[in-house]
Image (cartoon, rainbow, N blue to C red):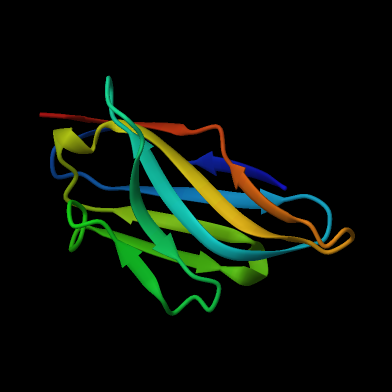
């Protein structure tokens, strides 16, 4: 299963961006999808998760109240609406998804290639 992120870019402090993550491939079901980010010179960190029932979401304390995660199961797509962006949100943002390949019954844990988000002061 392939994940492709889009929507990154450069904004000023207080600005907004919306990231998308589209899953594609042979027949599959998606479980939990998540966003992670890797700030410059730092380790990758978890940002938010959206569970398969679409009603349960979790956000890191650092983005609570500013970011919203959502997903559209019909489109196999996950979103991250980022508002009130701060310079410390600057990072490469990665999407991650777990699920099952229906043809083989095998589970997968896939990552996208990442999209850059830069917030300037």
Q: Residue at x 52, y 59 (%)?
A: 33
Q: Residue at x 28, y 29 (%)?
A: 39
| Residue found at the far top of this picture | 41
Q: Position of residue 117 (x, y in %)?
A: 33, 33
Q: Position of residue 107 (x, y in %)?
A: 72, 57
Would residue 112 appear left or right of 89 to someone viewing this image? right
Q: Is residue 28 visible?
A: yes
Residue 19 vertical placement versus 92 (above, below): below
Would residue 41 appear left or right of 20 to someone viewing this image? left
Q: Is residue 7 visible?
A: no
| Residue found at the far left of this picture | 121
Q: Residue at x 19, y 44 (%)?
A: 85
Residue 55 vertical placement versus 74 (above, below): below
Q: Residue at x 39, y 44 (%)?
A: 36
Residue 3 vertical placement versus 54 (above, below): above
Would residue 92 appear left or right of 66 to someone viewing this image? right
Between residue 18 and residue 102, name the one nearer to us. Answer: 102
Q: Position of residue 40 (x, y in %)?
A: 28, 22
């Amino acid at each position: 299963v392939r994940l492709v992120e889009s929507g990154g870019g450069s904004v000023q402090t207080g600005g907004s961006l919306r990231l998308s993550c589209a899953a594609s491939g042979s027949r599959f079901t998606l479980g939990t999808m998540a966003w992670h980010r890797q700030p410059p010179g730092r380790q990758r960190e978890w940002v938010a998760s959206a569970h398969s029932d679409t009603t349960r979401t979790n956000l890191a304390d650092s983005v609570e109240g500013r970011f919203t995660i959502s997903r559209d199961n019909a489109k196999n797509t996950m979103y991250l609406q980022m508002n009130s962006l701060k310079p410390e949100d600057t990072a490469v943002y990665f999407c991650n998804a777990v699920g099952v390949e229906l043809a083989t019954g095998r589970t997968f844990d896939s990552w996208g290639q990442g999209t850059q988000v830069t917030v300037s002061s």
